[in-house]
Image (cartoon, helix red, strand yellow):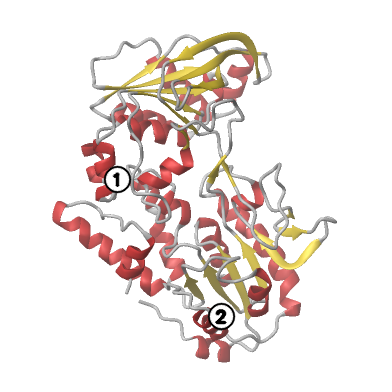
Amino acid sequence: MLVPNWTVFSQTCSMTLRVAVVGAGPAGIYTADHLVKSDTGVSVDILERLPAPFGLVRYGVAPDHPRIKEIVKALQRVLANPRVRLLGNVDLGIDLKLDELRTYYDAVVIATGAMTDRPLGIVGEDLPGSFGAADFVSWYDAHPDVPRSWPLTAKSVAVVGAGNVALDVARVLAKTADEMLTTDIPEHVHAGLQANRATDVHVFARRGPAYVKFSPLELRELAHSPNIDVVVHPEGFEVDKASMEHIATNKQAKIVLDTLANWVGREPTGKPHRIHLHFLEQPVTIHGDHRVEALRTERTQLVGDGTVIGTGEETVWDVQAVYRAIGYRSTPLPGLPFDDTAGVIPNSGGRVLNLADEPIPSIYVTGWIKRGPIGLIGHTKSDAAETVTHLLAETRPTATKREPQAIEDHLTDRGVDFTTFAHWERVDAHELSLGRPTKRPRVKVAGREEMLLAGR
């Protein structure tokens, strides 16, 4: 393990630029990587609200997607850099105010991402049995701040959305619990999935099949389970001239459309669970007296430019739960402006702007809090590079000598039980050891207190 010697490092750099990055997901860690690889003497502290790093890679990727989680290896290498320090279990706005943070650093980069669900904005959305996909993902990924149980009593479920998160939710709801025993889920998630009563999961997309945001790999994975039949309903499976022009310039969209076309009209083979894919259907109302009892949708039609309009033709689906998976949304942070319409911190190329659209000195953003929840994990690299370019150009001339130990002393005085990269390494080793008896890759530690204890 590399242990940064901050005293030696500060003595070897006549003027070390000290930067705080708030958020230890891919966006924040890539930002730290760009900073320490620059030709400027930079030291970076990454402050994370949770005890463990990696953000959506750890708490937003479905557990049966270990290939995506391999990115953790690259992120760990950045955290092991002696010029990067992880300070976990530190909540900006509670443990530390923004103005306090600025006294310890020459610049602050906000990389807190997006973890809440966009609302559907329809009647009945607040009924019991109506859920946000992000909350369900947090449950099956054992996020330390969510309850251990999840109500999986519905036999027929609706998932509203046409992206990979919608497919993740549908797949986890349709798979058997034992199929997930090759993943890192803890016992309480396995027990919850064992109690799952769902047999039919209906996925609704407002647009046509050429415009869904599924990745080819995610879509094909639906058919890999020995317990799931994938049913693509022909009603709404329409492809017009604009759709053909769209797939002609989008290779992934063409592969997805071809895959779906091969599945249209296939009869179920008798497997115990079914995922139904419906196109050109938009949610109108969620019905129920005391909880979800049905979803009313409206058939839409293509209008020739990739968009759709409602037709007035409605269908009521007998479902007992509805999951909305129409996108994530960022939340405001104390002391910073927030564009509630766009769901981002106002910025220009990563420079945070005040209400007069003027840059706030030394405050920057990167990732989804900067540009909205679009793009894959890899897109955050170029995003971070843009922000870092502005930060270095504007902050180097104003750098002042600061002591790295000062922030730790401040947190200790506040009674904050902060974690470090060494703490994470012990948690990592502990999770790997939990998986060995059953030849699983790891078993994730759940709960904030459990995670703090595991790293001691």
Q: Secondary structure at mark 2?
A: helix
Judging by the rendered image, the residue that carries numbered circle 2 is 407
**Residue 102 in picture, x, y percent from top left:** 67, 74
Query: Nearer the observer, disc 2 or disc 1?
Result: 1
List the single residue furthest toward the right: 356
**Vertical comparison of 223 with 345: above or below:** above
Res 80 → quadrant: bottom left
Q: 347 or 73, which lies in front?
A: 347
Residue 222 seen from this side: yes
**Residue 410 in picture, x, y percent from top left:** 56, 82
> Residue at coordinates 46% horizontally, 27% vertically from top-left?
290
Residue 215 seen from this side: no
Which quadrant, please, contains the C terminus?
bottom left
At label 2, which amino acid type do we have? Ile
Res 206 → quadrant: top right
Q: Secondary structure at mark 1?
A: helix
**Residue 225 in picture, x, y percent from top left:** 27, 29
